[in-house]
Amino acid sequence: MVHPQWLRSFATLAELGNFTRTADQLGLTQAAVSQHVRHLESEFGPLLIRRPRALELTPAGNALLDYCRELDKADERLRTRLSDADGTNGEVSLITPGSIGLYLYPVLLAFQQANRGVVVRHRFAPDPEVVEAVLQNRYELGLVTLPPDDARLTASPFTSESLELVVPAQETAHTWEDLARIGFIDHPDGQAMASRLLSRRFPANPGVGSLPCRGFCNHIGLILEPVARGLGFTVIPRYAHQAFARADAVRVVDCGSPVVDTLWLIHRSEWPLSARATRVLDYLRQHVWGCATTPFPAPA
């Protein structure tokens, strides 16, 4: 590796074109500057043509000056990345479950539109994958439905999300018989979610398994599509419903006492969040605060 002081002397000399002024600017002697240049020329060949009133760079000198400039730019990028002073440049990475992800991803894109120096990287994943991705530093931020028991992670309440009984817009669901008539649209968490919510609304029900199944979908963004087409009802987290484009084609049935889950924000506990992540979280919380689901304040 080339000695940084030699490169600094050479780059300053190339800029000023004079050994004396270079030495004064760097706080060195003229002999020291000359020695630095000789060290470089012993390694790379002639770098300067010394003329009475000026210095001219050889092709090797120009190549070395370009190298010095690239090092300066790399140093600036490193300092910017480490200081992250304004939080308006660089990557923001977030990994979340599907429901909240459907709601937050367009919000993240709006943030990126307003901050073109930021690159948004978002992934949908179940809780175990979210935890592993944050632990392995593949994502800076994650949201999970249960706080992980791991000292390497900090977990704080981000927002809460209720379950909703969603039926076709033209349907009513006052009784268990209504649900049996409409039929159930299942999904990977459908049975568990429906059991939790419907036991509140219909405490003496014979179980979700007794309802006719009219379909199954494992894509969180499409679960409500068969409901909108009148093919059945489902139970789904509120954020997934809020992200559904055809809101007028479905209807939420009031089930009385709500079933509410907390969504937890996780990140590595050993180092602080980047300024970008902090800005994004503030932005996301503002939008979550504006929706019907109960948010939590930012941790102190």
Image: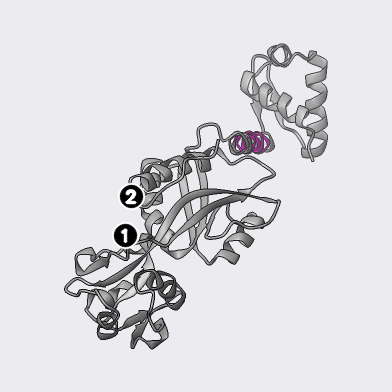
The residue positioned 68% from the left and 12% from the top of the image is 21
- Overall secondary structure of the magenta stretch? helix
In what element is the residue under mark 1?
A: helix
Query: What colour scheme was applied to this rendering of the protein?
Result: one colour
Query: In the rendered structure, are the residues bearing label 1 and label 2 in contact, judged by CB atoms less than 8 Å apart?
Result: yes
Which residue corresponds to mark 2? 291
Q: Residues within 10 Å of mark 1 (few under 14, many from 20)?
A: some
User: Which range is magenta?
Assistant: 63-76
Q: Is residue 73 magenta?
A: yes
The residue positioned 29% from the left and 77% from the top of the image is 233
Q: Is residue 18 above or below residue 169?
A: above
Q: Residue 79 falls in which quadrant of the image?
A: top right
Q: Residue 10 falls in which quadrant of the image?
A: top right
Which residue corresponds to mark 1? 242
Instruction: Using the image as rendered, state which of residue 123 and residue 294 is in the foreground.
Output: 294
Q: Position of residue 64 (x, y in %)?
A: 68, 36
Q: Is residue 260 above or below residue 204?
A: above
The residue positioned 37% from the left and 61% from the top of the image is 257
Three-letter code, disc 1? Gln
Instruction: Determine the residue located farthest toward the front in the rendered image.
Output: 204
Instruction: Using the image as rendered, state which of residue 7 and residue 290 is in the foreground.
Output: 290
Q: Is residue 169 magenta?
A: no
Instruction: Using the image as rendered, state which of residue 250 and residue 92 is in the foreground.
Output: 250
**First of labels 1, 2 by sequence position:** 1
Q: Residues within 10 Å of mark 2 (few under 14, many from 20)?
A: few
